[in-house]
Image (cartoon, rainbow, N blue to C red):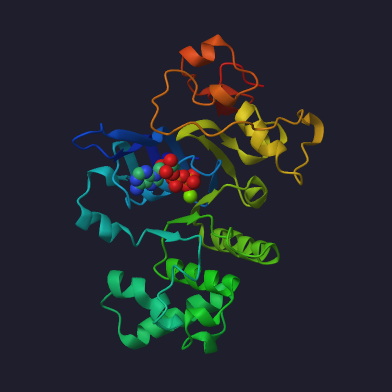
Amino acid sequence: MSDRDTILSVENLSVHFRLGGGVFSRASIVRAVENVSFALQRGETLSIVGESGSGKSTLARAVLRLVAITKGSVILNGENLAQLSNNEVRKRRQNMQMVFQDPIASLSPRRTVEQIIAEPLMVHQPELSGEERSAKVRDTMDAIGLLPDMRNRYPHEFSGGQAQRIGIARALIVEPTLLVADEPVSALDVSIQAQVLNLLSDIKRQRSLSLLFISHDLSVVQHVSDRLLVLYLGHVMEVGAAKDIYANPQHPYTKALLSAVPTIDFSANKPKRTRLTGELPSPTVEHVGCPFASRCPMAQAICNEQKPQLNTVEGRDVACHFPG
Ligand code: ADP
Ligand code: MG
């Protein structure tokens, strides 16, 4: 694939939050995202997975510049968002839209479905007439599987699955090139999850949309991901083709995550059940060695002394001194 098809390129991105710091205490730095790099092609779905607290939401928000970028670049359609003013970034939001975890909470309760879905048009295409706007809302609702007579109703009248469709319609009405979905089905009943996942897959295919899909649950993203990025304490542990990683994980952390999912079958390479024990270390610690060393069944002395760099192993990139 040529560079022309690279929609998003994240390079050495770090996001740190400063906590506390006063007369009697020193400030500490939460290292939510540490030196993360990846690229996303047109029409591709990259899923970002990891336990709660691993920095997935912060990474997603930094890509859209909804949190401040501490270091590195986020290049969307050839432009580094890290260097744009807030005002410039606001204009770029037409190209990058987000779907949130809790569908009902993320929709304004006092607005009708039509007003909610039309909102990004008011911001990004103010030149449209009321009639043109309504026509776009109708078309988008139709494409997302929402019935026209829902237009004048309010979010609380809908189930979680329908509300998430409203959120998806709102994100898509401005025809973004990048859609970021942060745990979009985690709040939904299992029976509804597959419908919303299929909807996202279909839309992605029809519109050549690039999708950044965030989930703590590897079974949720198994069938929608082209590529997978495994995050731990803000660090990339393993990144590559989803089918390769699901079939034959190389990083001990990926193995532990996958073996916790009972429904995933590793075909030929079924690893021994690796249980994740111990707590996630504090994100305020700066790691000299591998951030996973304290919980890793394979850890040797070097793991605490030297941070493993990403290296190509079995066709994907793995940050581990003892992969495989
Ligand atoms: P995930 O989405 O994978 O659960 P998050 O990105 O929400 O992870 O959080 C990563 C780390 O950053 C956590 O330790 C969290 O407490 C911390 N964090 C997130 N947002 C902030 C913030 N605004 N201020 C301070 N710490 C934050
Ligand atoms: Mg999150």
Q: Quadrant of the C terminus?
A: top right
Question: Can you give x and y, in whole percent of width and height, for residue 253 in the image?
Answer: 61, 30
Identify which residue is drawn at 34% across, 62% down. 94
121 to 1, vertically: above or below: below
Count of marks overlaid on the render: 0
Question: Can you give x and y, in whole percent of width and height, for residue 116 in the image?
Answer: 40, 77
Image side of residue 290 versus residue 324, left or right: left
88 to 253, vertically: above or below: below
**Residue 4 visible within the image:** no
220 to 197, vertically: above or below: above
Task: Name the outermost residue toward the top.
Answer: 301
Q: Quadrant of residue 243?
A: top right
Question: Can you give x and y, in whole percent of width and height, for residue 246 in the image?
Answer: 68, 38
Identify which residue is drawn at 33% across, 53% down. 66
Identify which residue is drawn at 50% across, 21% down. 290
**Along the viewing direction, whichever of 39 and 182 lies nearer the viewer:** 182
Identify which residue is drawn at 67% across, 62% down. 194
Question: Can you give x and y, in whole percent of width and height, for residue 206 in the image?
Answer: 56, 63
**Along the viewing direction, whichever of 19 and 291 lies nearer the viewer:** 19
Task: Name the outermost residue toward the right.
Answer: 268
